[in-house]
Amino acid sequence: MVLAQLGGSISRAIQQMSNATVIDEKALNDCLNEITRALLQSDVQFKLVRDMQTNIKKIVNLDDLAAGHNKRKIIQQAIFNELCKMLDPGKPSFAPKKGKTNVVMFVGLQGSGKTTTCTKYAYYHQKKGWKPALVCADTFRAGAFDQLKQNATKAKIPFYGSYTESDPVKIAVEGVERFKDENCDLIIVDTSGRHKQEASLFEEMRQVSEATRPDLVIFVMDSSIGQAAFDQAQAFRQSVAVGAVIITKMDGHAKGGGALSAVAATKSPVIFIGTGEHMDEFEVFDVKPFVSRLLGMGDLSGFMDKIKEVVPMDQQPELLQKLSEGNFTLRVMYEQFQNLLKMGPIGQVFSMLPGFSADLMPKGHEKEGQAKIKQLDNSNPKLMNESRMMRIARGSGRPVREVMELFEEYKRIAKAWSNMKGLGKMAKKGDMSS
Ligand code: GDP
């Protein structure tokens, strides 16, 4: 089950429970069983799911909740908290400091996306004004140095490696020393992977780590690893001091739940996720906004941050004004569509808005999405009735069913829009102007 579906299943389970005439033990159990099933289908480890279920039951004591209590809200909050707990090890990872020397070592199995991720990580920081550098200490895989060199050159990031030297420790030490001398503040060491976990890989990792004394070790894991995630993460953690995790290929059809919940095995947070092969298909990972988006509750502060990042400065004041009036309408959204596209995969942008789900606009369907918004914007819901829908259908040559679906979607979006007041408040606080 891909993550957007997982979120949909959990939200539906909560919705079904709140539709029940009384929220009693049975309604709660049905809801939790449904959530359990969805999490297991997403490859989250059985023990984690069972613990979560037990905890929610402990927290939500239906007998203690007096009649007037909003049980749905309390249960939804408990589910939210438990999902966050599952993805949050409770301590932040080491945060490199700009302007100081930081050595960051990447580890992971071959094919996990380690080399690609090293460059993405460097590029992300470079855009924020850091001075990153890449060291290729992978002497095991033929072509590893060429790949790193190619990526680094494209991103204009200095790199170090060798075609002839076979000792990864020697290369790692030389590279780190060189970039320390050049005052780089983020020295990234890419290490070898293997097809599967084996003693020689872990021994090599240990040696490189001992010789370069990294400030942070980042473990890179492919999101499609499934149930094996927990054991793999634990094996790496036992050999080297993993401080943070990056999950790759979250754009694919992978279930992702197993990898995400592997934080429980490494006791280190997921800090970024990879969402494509390109250099900028890379997102900061924050537990609460992620779970919030997963449950269709939106992530307004993430949305605002993205707007700040991508909307040109001269358009920001006007947008700020519209937002502060609570006036972020479909029309504004249509006008801003090109900017929204820059925010990242449009489905992910939508999932930051309450009431939207990432599958409203799947990757690769941006054009259709834009057309959809325009169509929705042009239809006036007050004037919409059956004969009008039939007329629109005839006029556009589309089946009536499609027009009806579109209208239903419009109503859903319009409803979600009424929840958008928060954006206005945040804009007023001056979040847009900083
Ligand atoms: P390494 O062996 O661990 O260094 O893995 P590579 O960096 O060579 O990546 C293996 C493959 O996965 C390459 O084809 C990458 O383009 C691809 N890849 C890496 N990260 C992502 C991602 O986030 N999404 C997608 N779709 N592909 C990725």
Image: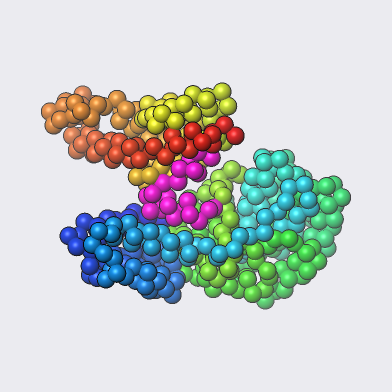
Q: Does residue 340 show up magenta in the picture?
A: no
Q: Residue shown at 54%/60% (left/top)?
A: 222
Q: Residue furthest left?
A: 387
Give the total of numbered labels. 0
Q: Residue shown at 41%/42% (left/top)?
A: 353
In this view of the protein, which residue sits in the foreground, 116 or 326? 326
Q: Is residue 39 above or below residue 54?
A: above
Magenta residues span: 285-305
Q: Quadrant of residue 111?
A: bottom right
Q: Quadrant of residue 212?
A: bottom right
Report whether residue 145 is seen. no
Report whether residue 267 is seen. yes
Q: Residue shown at 38%/41% (left/top)?
A: 361
Q: Residue shown at 65%/66% (left/top)?
A: 242
Q: Residue furthest right?
A: 181
Q: Is residue 308 above or below residue 186?
A: above
Residue 273 in the image, given as x and y percentages of width and height: 55, 53
Classified by dominant secondary structure, the portion drawn in magenta counts as helix
Residue 76 in the image, given as x and y percentages of width and height: 35, 58
Q: Quadrant of residue 268?
A: bottom right
In this view of the protein, which residue sits in the foreground, 398 or 126? 126
Residue 352 in the image, given as x and y percentages of width and height: 44, 44
Which image quadrant: the N terminus? bottom left
Query: Does 307 sit left or right of 159 as displayed?
Result: left
Q: Does residue 286 show up magenta in the picture?
A: yes
Which image quadrant: the C terminus? top right
Query: Does 385 sit left or right of 338 as displayed?
Result: left
